[in-house]
Amino acid sequence: MAASGRTKTLLDITASALMCCAALVVLYRFSQPASKTASRILPIYTVGERFEGASLLGGDNSHSTLVVWVRSTCPFCSESMEFYKRLASGPRRAKLVVMGAEPSGVLEAYVASYGLQPDRVVSWPKGMAKLPVTPVLLLVGNNSIVQGLWRGKLARAHEEAVAAALR
């Protein structure tokens, strides 16, 4: 019995020590100043920045372009497709271009499966460097400068802001 009691005590001490270590790791991770954690956030375009993929948007540069960055396996992209369809069919002053890092055939099939008819579908693996998350909407001016940026599945108010920016 004495050995069993010591084993139980040793196990209790070990479990407590592991819990303390885990708590310290969590505290350390969430106590870092923003400047240290900001470097871990993936880069994304910002308003006023030049869009590197402007040459892929096609056509003349007399109009702005709404770039819809998606991934076929992204649930938020799929949930947003109805909104993108409304943008494509509604009044707008901008072209609608769907882009993604997947092969063109995959993107085209994905977009077609939702009945979305953009002006163009473009595969751009290089875009992953500045568009690491999906979905992202970028309003790119005719001067290739990002004029608007929206990330993720948008709330109704943000959808209205995007639609207003296109009129």
Image (tube, rainbow, N blue to C red):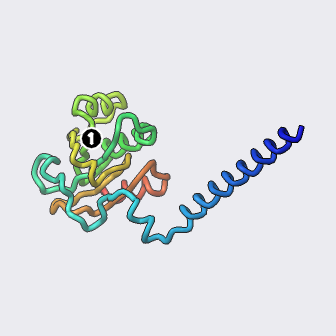
Q: Camera-side residue: 68 or 29?
A: 29
State the residue at coordinates (23%, 58%): 140
In percent of width and height, residue 150 lies at 38, 56
Q: Quadrant of residue 111?
A: top left
- Vertical placement of residue 58 versus 150, above or below: above
Camera-nearest residue between 76 and 112: 76
Q: Mark 1 = which residue?
A: 101
In the shown orientation, is residue 16 left or right of residue 163?
right
Residue 67: x %, y % from top left: 27, 49
Callout 1, which amino acid? Ala
**Up-down: is 48 above or below 140?**
below
Q: Whole-percent x and y of residue 71? A: 34, 39
Q: Tell me which corner region of the image, top left, top right, bottom left or bottom right, holds residue 120.
A: top left
Q: Which residue is at a point 35% across and 50% down the rendered structure image?
A: 136
Going 36% across and 56% down the picture, which residue do you hit? 42
Q: Quadrant of the C terminus?
A: bottom left
